Amino acid sequence: MPEGPSIILLREKAAPLISRKILNVKGDSSKFDLQKVLNCPVLDLKTFGKEFLICLPDFTIRVHLQLFGSYLINERKDGALKLGLIFGEDKELNFYACDARIIEEPLDQVYDWSAEVMHESWDAGKALKKINAKPDRLIGDVLLDQGIFAGVGNKIKDEVLYEVRVHPESLVGEMGKKKLADTVDTCVSKSFEYLEWEKSGRPEGFLKVHRQKECPVYHTPLTSKKIGKTKRQSYFCENCQKLYI
DNA sequence: GGGAATGTTCACTA
DNA sequence: CTAGTGAACATTCC
C-alpha cells in the first residue's frame, strides 16, 4: 500500500475531516491510549514521506501503514482495526494493520521537511549534501533512506534507477555530479508520476522494471536480487543500467 | 498451500 | 555505548 504518493492521496481523500471533532474512537492500538484523542478537533492533516499525521491541539497521531496496512474512509471491513476515528454519521476514518502512535513534540522539531520529496520545502541541494557525506554507500540503499528521500519506496527506487540508467549497486561517490543530481531530481518527478498513476487507477505499463520480467528496451531478462544493507529486492537491467564503481 | 512483498521498529548481541 | 543482525508485525496476491 504505502509509498509517499499513496499517503498524499490519503491526505487528499481525508481532507474533508479537517476541523471536525473526533466524537468516538475504536480500535486496538497498543502504542497509546485511544481515549486520549476523544473530543479533539482535527486541526490539520499532513504527511511526511510514508507517515500520515493527524494534528490535534496538543499532540499528533502518526499513522504508518508499513507493508500491509490499509485504510477506509466512511467504510468499515472485517479485520484488525487499529485505529478508527468517528466524526459523525457516516463520517469516519479507519486504519487497519498499521502502526499508530502519538507524537508529543512539535512537528517542526521532529521532521526535516526539506527531506520530503513531495513537500514544497523539498531541497535537492540538501539531499546531495547528505549523500556526498557518505560516498561509499550504494545508490540503491540511499534512495530508500527516509532521512534523505522521505516517501521513496522500493517501487519508486527501482523505477528511478531504471529511468536514469544507473545500476542499484553503484557507489554514490563514483556516479559523478551530474548523474547524481539527475537521480535526485528523478526521485521527485517519479513520485509525482506515481501519484498520477495511482489516481488513474494504476493502469498497466507504469512499472518498467519493478517486478517485471524483461527489459523494455532489450527484451532480455531483468535481474532481480537483494541489494546492499537494506537487502531489498531490486529489479534492474544489466544491459541498460550502468554500474559506477 | 508456500512464498514473497509497497516497511519500519525493536530486542538482542558482539 | 554503538553498530549490526534478525525477529516481529500482519495482509494479499500469485
Image: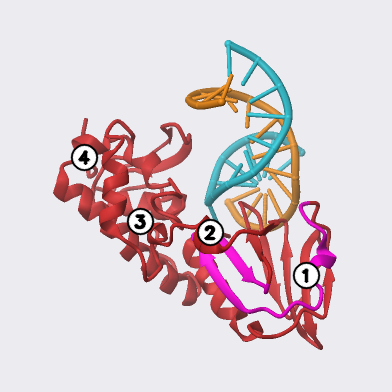
Chain colours: A red, B cyan, C orange
Q: CA distance from mark 4 to mark 3?
A: 17 Å
Q: Which mark is residue A50?
A: 2
- Check disc 3 and report the residue beneath it: A208
Asked whether the residues under the numbered discs 1 and 2 touch, taking CB atoms below 8 Å apart as contact, a structural biologist would say no
Q: Earlier in the sequence, mark 2 or mark 3?
A: 2
Label pair 4/3, CB-CB below 8 angstroms: no
Which residue lies under the disc numbered 4? A242
Give the image location of residue A240, x and y in percent.
22, 45
Q: Residue A44: horizontal and vertical position, in percent?
A: 59, 77
Q: What stretch of residues is rendered in magenta?
A: A31-57
Of badges 4 and 1, the one in the foreground is: 1
Badge 1 is on which residue?
A: A37
Quadrant location, the N terminus of chain A: bottom right
Residue A36 belongs to magenta span? yes
Give residue A188's quadrant in the image: bottom left
Q: Residues within 10 Å of mark 1 (few under 14, many from 20)?
A: many
Helix, strand or loop at disc 4?
A: loop
Q: Earlier in the sequence, mark 4 or mark 1?
A: 1
Quarter of the rendering containing residue A150: bottom left
Residue flagged by tag 2: what amino acid is it? Lys
**Do dots 1 and 3 share one subunit?**
yes
Q: Kindly identify which numbered label has been placed on residue A22.
A: none
Q: CA distance from mark 4 to mark 2?
A: 29 Å
Residue at 33% over, 34% down = A137
| Amino acid type shown at disc 3 | Lys
Mark 4 neighbour class, 10 Å CA radius: few under 14, some 14 to 19, many 20 or more? some
